[in-house]
């Protein structure tokens, strides 16, 4: 019995998470696996119902589950709440922190059928398969922050960027391990020419490399990395970087694959692993059966592989997605000329049909 906590959240979250559940249920029947689903509130939906975007019961459910599948949080309705109650800062970041999920795996893989949907030239992206590992519980997003009033009537906003040796080492270790399983190349991304935290980052990574003589380690400044990702993305294999750089670079990398609606992620390192699409809650298209469910369905596949070790089942889902795309089915975000546009539910129907 695999116990899965579902946190649909806001916007398109409550549309896409049930689609991933449908796929998992079909997998369960087909391969004789028992999945137990329990749902809890998070984000704006939780705030509306309980007054807090991350209720204690939600954390409890996550801790008592084998894995967590999250949709997305946030939306204009909650944008003006005080920062600690906003879905992003009051729910998503503390959820990651409280569950100890310091490593976020964001694979950017170009589906063969979608190479021409990328805004980049097809030859630059076709065959691309990059794994970006983003540090997820440190850095600027978690540092002490405050405002001060200035005598000139203006204000000063202060953020703090901290990293410790141990925080860098544990996520870098995952980078080396991942590189070992793939092409034995690791790119560490920092801004060591300017930031003290990046200087420490680089020192720690270089020291750790002694334990991985079989992995070829390189370093790149984050600004150059952004440029290289659009100039020649296939030079990369496994990348590891700090929280904010990873946040930005993974949105960029998502476009190499055609759409941010395609990319799954896994957050690891804690008591329970969390899987979520890297896209947000897309309030502009919520409730209209327009959202692309593939990133969430692929996140469920990642869950099967990474947490449950169900490689065959995970591969079956990934193949079904490939097949449906090869057949010419698309959601709006990846629509191309002469293809067939489907809604959220119908795209999932097609994937389920392809599962056979
Ligand atoms: C992401 C998102 C979040 C982040 C936001 C919603 C807080 O952009 O998962 O990449 O910055 O981590
Ligand atoms: Mg982001």
Image (cartoon, rainbow, N blue to C red):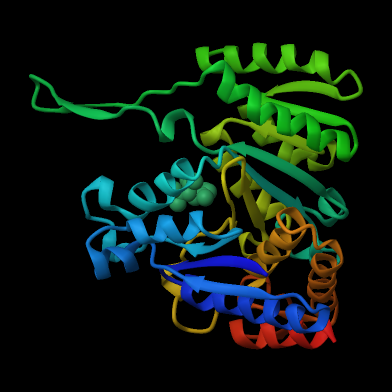
Q: Is residue 140 above or below residue 99?
A: above
Residue 265 drawn at (x, y percent)? 64, 53
Residue 348 drawn at (x, y percent)? 68, 82
Residue 126 visible? The answer is yes
The quarter holding residue 169 reads top right
Residue 11 drawn at (x, y percent)? 42, 70
Residue 209 relative to residue 45: left or right: right
Residue at the spot 73% in from the left edge and 62% down from the top edge: 304
Residue at the spot 76% in from the left edge and 84% down from the top edge: 29
Q: Is residue 98 above or below residue 161?
A: below
Residue 68 relative to residue 130: left or right: left
Residue 97 relative to residue 19: left or right: left
Residue at the spot 79% in from the left edge and 57% down from the top edge: 309
The quarter holding residue 26 reads bottom right
Q: Is residue 257 above or below residue 200?
A: below
Q: How many marks?
A: 0
Quadrant (top left/top right/bottom left/bottom right) for the C terminus: bottom right
Residue 195 visible? The answer is no
Q: Nearer the viewer, residue 230 or 313?
A: 313
């Amino acid at each position: 019995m695999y116990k899965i906590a579902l946190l649909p959240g806001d916007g398109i979250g409550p549309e896409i998470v049930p689609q991933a559940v449908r796929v998992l249920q079909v997998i369960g029947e087909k391969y004789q696996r028992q999945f137990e689903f329990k749902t809890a509130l998070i984000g704006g939906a939780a705030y509306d119902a309980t007054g807090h975007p991350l209720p204690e019961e939600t954390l409890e459910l996550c801790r008592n589950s084998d894995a967590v599948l999250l949709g997305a949080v946030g939306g204009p309705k909650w944008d003006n709440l005080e920062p600690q109650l906003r879905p992003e800062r009051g729910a998503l970041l503390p959820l990651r922190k409280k569950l100890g999920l310091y490593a976020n795996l964001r694979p950017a893989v170009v589906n063969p059928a979608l190479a021409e949907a990328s805004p980049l030239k097809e030859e630059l992206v076709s065959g691309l398969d990059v794994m970006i590992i983003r540090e997820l519980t440190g850095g600027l997003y978690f540092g002490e922050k405050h405002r001060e009033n200035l005598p000139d009537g203006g204000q000063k906003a202060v953020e703090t960027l901290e990293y410790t040796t141990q925080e860098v080492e544990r996520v870098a270790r995952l980078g080396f391990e991942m590189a070992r399983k793939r092409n034995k190349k690791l790119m560490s991304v920092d801004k060591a020419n300017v930031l003290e935290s990046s200087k420490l980052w680089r020192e720690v990574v270089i020291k750790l490399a002694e334990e991985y003589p079989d992995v070829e380690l390189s370093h790149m400044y984050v600004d150059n990395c952004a440029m290289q990702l659009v100039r020649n993305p296939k030079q990369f294999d496994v990348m590891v970087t700090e929280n904010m750089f990873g946040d930005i670079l993974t949105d960029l990398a998502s476009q190499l694959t055609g759409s941010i609606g395609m990319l799954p992620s896994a957050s690891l390192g804690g008591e329970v692993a969390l899987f979520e699409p890297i896209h947000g809650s897309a309030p502009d298209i919520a409730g209209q059966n327009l959202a692309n469910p593939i990133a969430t369905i692929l996140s469920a596949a990642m869950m099967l592989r990474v947490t449950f070790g169900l490689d065959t089942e995970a591969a079956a889902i990934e193949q079904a997605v490939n097949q449906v795309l090869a057949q010419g089915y698309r959601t709006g975000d990846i629509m191309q000329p002469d293809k067939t546009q489907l809604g959220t539910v119908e795209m999932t129907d097609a994937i389920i049909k392809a599962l056979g």
